[in-house]
Image (spheres, rainbow, N blue to C red):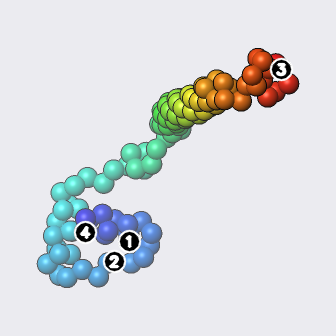
Amino acid sequence: MAAALYDQHWRMDWGLPHFSPPLMAAVQDYRSRTPVPSYYQQYPQVADIEGHFGRQTTRLLEHQTHVRGMWDREYELHHLEQDQEAQAIDFARRLEADLMEPFFTAPGGSSSQGGQ
């Protein structure tokens, strides 16, 4: 961590970080034993970026497809429940009308709805 902070200060031209003398000695010892990567190793190249972009695009499309599928499934389930509720309400109304019809039918066979 201290070596990474030292490298960041060096790259950004911020001067040396304010480390204690023992820590600074340890960082300098570490840096002397660890090779400094070249410019091409530090920064991604065009081919690497294109590959990364392609992978990220694929992951995004897979995620969008998954989310859209889940939304569609939830939408269908919700509307199926609404349809079932509407059918149950309609059935209850028809059942109530069928059960109550004998009470509203006039003697002679004509109903209160004009003989229908």
Is there a contact, CB below 8 Å, between mark 1 and mark 4?
A: no
Query: Tag count in the figure?
Result: 4
Label 3: element kind: loop
On the image, numbered disc 4 is attached to which residue? 2
Q: CA distance from mark 1 to mark 4?
A: 11 Å
Q: Going from the N terminus, do you reach mark 4 or mark 2 first? A: 4
Q: CA distance from mark 1 to mark 2?
A: 6 Å
Q: Quadrant of residue 61?
A: top right
On the image, numbered disc 3 is attached to which residue? 115
On the image, numbered disc 2 is attached to which residue? 16
Is there a contact, CB below 8 Å, between mark 4 and mark 2?
A: no
Q: Going from the N terminus, do you reach mark 1 or mark 2 first? A: 1
Q: Residues within 10 Å of mark 1 (few under 14, many from 20)?
A: some
Q: Going from the N terminus, do you reach mark 2 or mark 3 first? A: 2
Q: Going from the N terminus, do you reach mark 1 or mark 3 first? A: 1
Amino acid tagged 1: His
Is there a contact, CB below 8 Å, between mark 1 and mark 3?
A: no
Q: CA distance from mark 1 to mark 3?
A: 96 Å
Q: The N terminus is located in which quarter?
A: bottom left
In this rendered view, identify the residue nearer to me: 69 or 5: 69
Amino acid tagged 2: Leu
- Whole-percent x, y for residue 4 in the image: 30, 63
Amino acid tagged 3: Gly
Q: CA distance from mark 2 to mark 3?
A: 102 Å
Q: Residue furthest front?
A: 107
On the image, numbered disc 1 is attached to which residue? 9
Q: Residues within 10 Å of mark 4 (few under 14, many from 20)?
A: some
Q: Which mark is in front, 4 or 3?
A: 3
